[in-house]
Image (tube, rainbow, N blue to C red):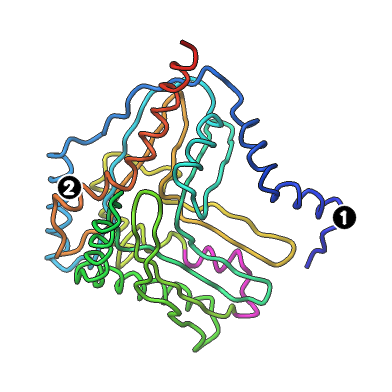
Amino acid sequence: MGKPDTAAHAAFQFLTDESNQTLLLKLAQSSDSFSIESFAAKWQKADYEKAFFRVQDYLQAGDCYQVNLTQPHSAQYTGSALDTLLPLYRALNPSYGCYFEGKDCQLVSVSPERFISIDNTGRLEAKPIKGTIKRSDDPIQDQLLIDELSSSPKNQAEKLMIVDLLRNDLSMSAQPGSVNVDNLFELESHPNVHHLVSTITAQLKPEISPAEAISNAFPGGSITGAPKKRAMEIISELEAQPRSLYCGSFGYYSDSGNTDFNILIRSLEFRDNTITCWGGGGITVDSDCDDEYEESLTKIRRIMETVEGISISRGKKDN
């Protein structure tokens, strides 16, 4: 286990100071030349419907209990991916966001979902999201939406399937009898949506490393379906294009013994002057096509509007 030195403590203090965070994010906005065209969906609604009902065929045939169906939206842009960080983080306030710069692409994620964390005592924690509904500016209407989400039999069934899948995934790395569901159907409210979130914990086997535990459970069941292998085959067959970084995972292994990885939902991939943003959701036999289609847009609408608004606001500033 590593021990941070004085310089590491000083750097951590600087980065976690609220005023310095704002300064760093402002500095990250390196260019005044960011511009973007409007996002366009890869699928028309008819394309989504075709894939949705093909998923229903597979579900009815017994291939799967649930399949996570997603669709991409893309836009041409100029400028830097860093220019989107401050607006997106202000608009979405992500719990598990990240920025990554690779050789050929950049990634900005405002993910609300934890895949797996492991602390230095070996405690594993997964927090799968299943169940989503839009928010309202009207407090009374917003509460009605919460009630609708919390009481939905479809959402509860969908959630139980994924919780059971995650329990199984964690059990591959956990000490026997240590897997527990600490919270089930817990409401989590974000600026754009309400979610139902569960918390599943376990104790890591001494002979299993954190890297092995992450690998054993990858990819996250909440963004594949159940059973996982068959769901991924159906996803590969039906979706418009490969998901790339989307629905993968981003995180760290620390020499202090802590590990934390997210699920790369609500994420933007910047590659070859194109931004790609995906939205989707879990499909079960009880799913309604129109509702699922709208949910896939609700999850990412604010993200796309925020990014499109950057060049608009800068255009007004220039005038």
Mark 1: amino acid: Thr
Q: Is residue 125 above or below residue 190?
A: below
Q: Secondary structure at mark 2?
A: helix
Residue at left 25%, top 64%? 149
Q: Label 2 neighbourhood size at 10 Å, few (<14), some (14-19), many (20+)?
A: many
Which residue is label 2 attached to?
51
**In the image: residue 287, left or right of residue 25:** left
Q: Secondary structure at mark 1?
A: helix
Give the foreground label among 2 and 1.
1
Residue at left 32%, top 45%? 279
- Is 306 or 39 nearer to us in this picture? 306
Residue at left 29%, top 47%? 70
The answer to whether the residue labelled 2 contacts the one labelled 1, judged by CB atoms less than 8 Å apart, is: no
Residue at left 13%, top 57%? 288
Main SS, magenta region, reads: helix
Magenta residues, start to end: 205-217
**In the image: residue 258, left or right of residue 242:** right
Q: Is residue 103 above or below residue 317?
A: below
The circle drawn on residue 295 is none
Q: Label 1 neighbourhood size at 10 Å, few (<14), some (14-19), many (20+)?
A: few
Q: Position of residue 61 (x, y in %)?
A: 13, 66
Which residue is label 1 attached to?
6
Q: Position of residue 80 (x, y in %)?
A: 54, 26
- Is 133 or 214 nearer to us in this picture? 133
